[in-house]
Image (spheres, rainbow, N blue to C red):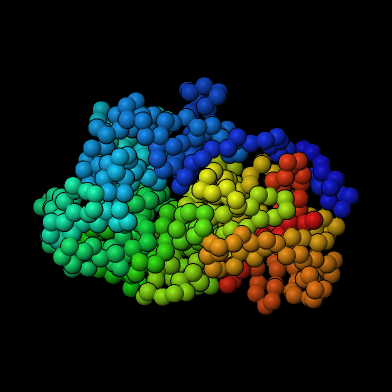
Amino acid sequence: MSCDKSLNGKAIVQEPGIAGDLKRVSVHDPCIVKFSDAKSGAEKSSMYYIFGTHGVAARSADLASWESFTNGYARKNNVLYGNLAENLAEPFAWAGHNDADCTGGFAVWAPDVFYNPHYVNEDGSAGAYMIYFCTSSTYCRSCIGYAVSDHIDGDYKYKGTLVYSGFTEESSKDKKSKIDKKWTNTNLPFLMESSQIEAGLNAEWVAGNTYNTDYAPNAIDPGLFFDAEGRLWMTYGSWSGGIYILEIDAKTGKAIYPGKNGVTADGRVIDKYFGTRLAGGHTLSGEGPFIVYDAKTGWYYLYTTYNYLDSKSGYNMRLFRSKSPEGPYTDAAGNSAVFESKRANYYETGIKVMGNYKFSRSEGYRSPGHCSSFIDDDGQMYLIYHTRFENAGESFEARVHQQFVNEEGWPVTAVFENRGNRLAAAGYGKKEITGEYEFINHGLVSDGSYVKKPKNIRLKAKGTVINEDNEEIGTWEEKKGSSAAVFVLNGITFHGFFFAQADESSEHKIAMTFTAIGENNETIWGVKL
């Protein structure tokens, strides 16, 4: 244990944090997995891995400093895929290799890696590391495949392609492409002939040489998870027709398709091939879905990311939840994650986890998004995402923040990145909390054109909150015997936590912070001056 005396002159007991500079890695669309195997030696007995787009991956012993270990799109001896072009020949026959948007190169994106103890290997043994990935050539012509390995580091052996998108009813080709997009060049004929899905094209999928992106998804960004009963699921999708979910046979890794078209009890689409729609639709923004199940709360938390991924377009993460893996998923305001029609104010749906921002004790962040979430063995939850930066062009790095489940059952995200500090179980005293703060409300809109700078507020000892003009704008309280925080600001109630953690300045001083989610889907953050 250690003490920091920088807060109002009174010592705050802290768990030892991670000191010094952290090693950074540029991993886009990071998925997180924990690897534990005593047979691998002490240096790898418990490691955290992130896998991302373009064959890039890294590992860490502390969820703070990272080391890359892959070789990107190396054609031979590729760390993850072996001989890249040969091993992934089947998905590349549809998209992702020297074609259209990826002419002269590859496009293998957004994998998810996990250990599946139920997978049956060729020799009859059980258990394998599995990687689900997507290859893509246009805004909608993509497919999702999977591969397996005995080792988390790879290489992974290709096993099959599950979902195709961007197909047409008649023969058709995209610009700079030799690939015929006719639906018969996907796995649909085989699935129909083997009675896995009903025969015939769904009239909603295509119209002649046009793929219906208002209804059907872009088959990218797979995310895998086990539910409370041990069933395996894959959520996926981007923009277009929304986010969908398919059950996966844990023994084979193959999809269990609905087989017939239908609707859920709450009126959502069940497509015989694509699965059940969870979110989005009507070509509105949303991609990078990831679901994490929290056994303590019984909630399935669904993350998606709105807007385009570059530094200027306001990429930002959104949060929903459900008591069932197949939904329905709703936000803090009770809105469905599914868009019922094409509308301009879709950004009002979904808790905005964070957007562009800068505190005086942090970097300026732009377009944080495409996240995964993870609950460690000790119960601590983490959010892992990539971000771009103010005045740094399109360069990006992975970041990890701690999360804590508030009184309303929502994970709130710590202000500063993870350095191993721990929430004070019994809470903090008024002297540690009261005072002047830099304050940011992440709002709801996708703020791509600017980086939010903080305003100053003051938390007074009597429980009131004062703004820069010395006007009372609400109240605050810390729940007795805990770090749980409740704010009422301008009539909106926010639930979250106070958290003393290392800041992101060069000295990494302990700062009192707060983080809370409002009943209106907004997230507020504060850093004490």
From the top left corner, tell me how far across and down residue 197 is, in percent.
17, 57
Q: Residue at x 80, y 58 (%)?
A: 433
Q: Residue furthest left?
A: 193
Q: How many marks?
A: 0
Say if 261 sits above or below 91 in the image: below
Q: Is residue 51 left or right of residue 124?
A: right
To which quarter of the image does residue 498 belong?
A: bottom right
From the top left corner, tell me how far across and down residue 315 is, in percent.
50, 58
Q: Nearer the viewer, residue 317 or 123?
A: 317
Query: Quarter holding the N terminus?
Result: top right
Res 9 seen here: yes
Q: Residue furthest right?
A: 9
Q: Is residue 517 left or right of residue 228?
A: right
Q: Nearer the viewer, residue 38 or 7?
A: 7
Q: Nearer the viewer, residue 391 or 84?
A: 391
Res 230 seen here: no
Q: Residue at x 40, y 40 (%)?
A: 54
From the top left corner, tell me how far across and down residue 6 is, in percent.
84, 47
Q: Residue at x 32, y 45 (%)?
A: 102
Q: Residue at x 89, y 50 (%)?
A: 9
